[in-house]
């Protein structure tokens, strides 16, 4: 659906996007996560045809954004970081204006406007001046504009920034609904937003991709394995004997436990393996009860800090050399 290949954007000497490559598949919600200044907006502006790249390629549904911008742009609805709203228009007038730009046939407009206004919750403010709307409503009008024409791909740059918690939840619900029919890419620097809304995450730092995976797999990927913590009521030699015989166990580490007569163990398997039930039955059969079991993979927050921090350290080192 979207292929980004070796994308580079330089502002003067400053490299904002550094040889970035990734693919976006149809029908999922992608989170584009990264600290401020990571290059999220720059990348989105290039993908949507608002900004020229220094080097690299972007293919949207088979159309090169630089060579066939009209065709490529038709597939995309975009809500930029600062939505280009006309403050002296009402949402109704603004949607009319956006529909003209998108060349949406007049006959389709009434029904489409009604649907989009309902979906984004702007029906109540439809004939008020955009200037007088709250930030949350302005954002919704921007979102309505992006959805107009129902493009296959919807790209949203920090759609919830500056909104209050209730508005954030409402906008996230709209995005989730969009994800049922569209491919959505949203940028954010908020990890919880990704967990709440996205199927897949791309993490970028300093213009480079540092991780891409499903939201749930990301924690495993950094360690390269699926990890489970258990507390077993048994002496460590028995635990060792049992785990050594289990084929799926790639590695285990025994630690002392705060529980009396128990040991804590971190059990690692391949990423695709879920060993929890097998652990339960195997230890039960040996009359060594597991009294605690928990997922020991890193949270999305841990992953984010780990993958982006490494890069920052690298940068500091290169800065020092200068
Ligand atoms: P993000 O959206 O992830 O916060 P941006 O894409 O806005 O990041 O910015 C990436 C880097 O490029 C930052 O270091 C920023 O300062 C720089 N940058 C962005 N826009 C411009 C510009 N128009 N001129 C010069 N530098 C820019
Ligand atoms: Mg940005």
Image (cartoon, grey):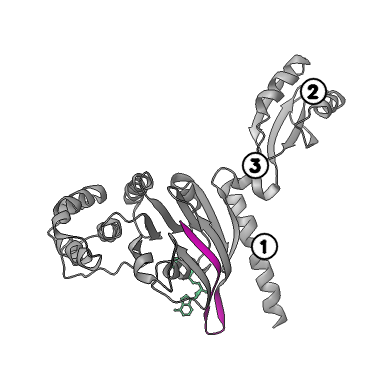
Evaluate whether residue 51 shows in this view.
yes
Residue count near mark 3 (Cα–Cα under 10 Å), binned few <14, some 14–19, many ≥20 = many
Q: Can residue 160 be seen from the camera position used here?
A: no
Range shown magenta: 1-16
Q: Quadrant of residue 248?
A: top right
- Dot 3: element: loop
Q: Secondary structure at mark 1?
A: helix
Q: Which residue is mark 2?
A: 261
Q: Write down the residue under mark 3.
A: 297
Residue in view at x 70 percent, y 47 percent? 223
Q: CA–CA distance between discs 3 and 2?
A: 26 Å
* Label 3 vs 2, first from the N-terminus: 2
List x then y, in percent, for residue 265: 76, 33
Verify CB contact (< 8 Å) between mark 3 and mark 2. Answer: no
Q: Secondary structure at mark 2?
A: loop
Cβ of mark 1 under 8 A from ligand 1: no
Q: Which residue is mark 1?
A: 310
Residue 71 on the magenta span: no
């Amino acid at each position: 659906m979207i292929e980004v290949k070796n994308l580079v954007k330089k502002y003067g000497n400053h490299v904002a996007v550094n040889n970035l490559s990734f693919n976006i598949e149809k029908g999922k919600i992608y989170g584009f996560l990264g600290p401020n200044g990571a290059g999220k907006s720059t990348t989105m502006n290039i993908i949507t045809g608002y900004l020229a790249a220094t080097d690299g390629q972007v293919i949207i549904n088979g159309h090169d954004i630089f060579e066939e911008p009209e065709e490529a742009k038709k597939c995309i609805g975009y809500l930029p970081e600062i939505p280009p709203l006309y403050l002296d228009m009402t949402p109704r007038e603004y949607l009319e204006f956006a529909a003209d730009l998108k060349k949406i046939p007049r006959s389709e407009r009434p029904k489409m406007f009604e649907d989009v206004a309902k979906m984004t919750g702007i029906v109540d403010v439809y004939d008020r001046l955009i200037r007088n709307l709250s930030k949350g409503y302005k954002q919704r009008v921007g979102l309505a504009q992006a959805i107009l024409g129902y493009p296959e791909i919807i790209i949203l740059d920090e759609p919830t920034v500056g909104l209050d918690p209730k508005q954030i939840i409402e906008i996230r619900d709209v995005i989730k609904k969009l994800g049922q029919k569209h491919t959505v890419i949203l940028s954010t620097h908020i990890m919880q937003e990704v967990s709440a809304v996205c199927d897949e995450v791309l993490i970028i730092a300093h213009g480079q991709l540092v991780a891409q995976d499903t939201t749930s797999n990301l924690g495993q990927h950094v360690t390269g394995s699926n990890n489970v913590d258990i507390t077993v009521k048994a002496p460590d030699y028995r635990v060792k004997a049992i785990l050594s015989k289990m084929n799926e166990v790639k590695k285990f580490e025994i630690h002392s436990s705060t529980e009396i007569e128990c040991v804590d163990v971190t059990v690692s398997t391949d990423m695709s393996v879920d060993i929890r039930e097998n652990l339960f039955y195997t230890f039960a059969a040996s009359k060594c009860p597991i009294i605690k079991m928990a997922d020991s993979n890193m949270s999305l927050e841990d992953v984010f800090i780990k993958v982006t921090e490494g890069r920052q350290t690298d940068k500091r080192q290169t800065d020092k050399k200068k």
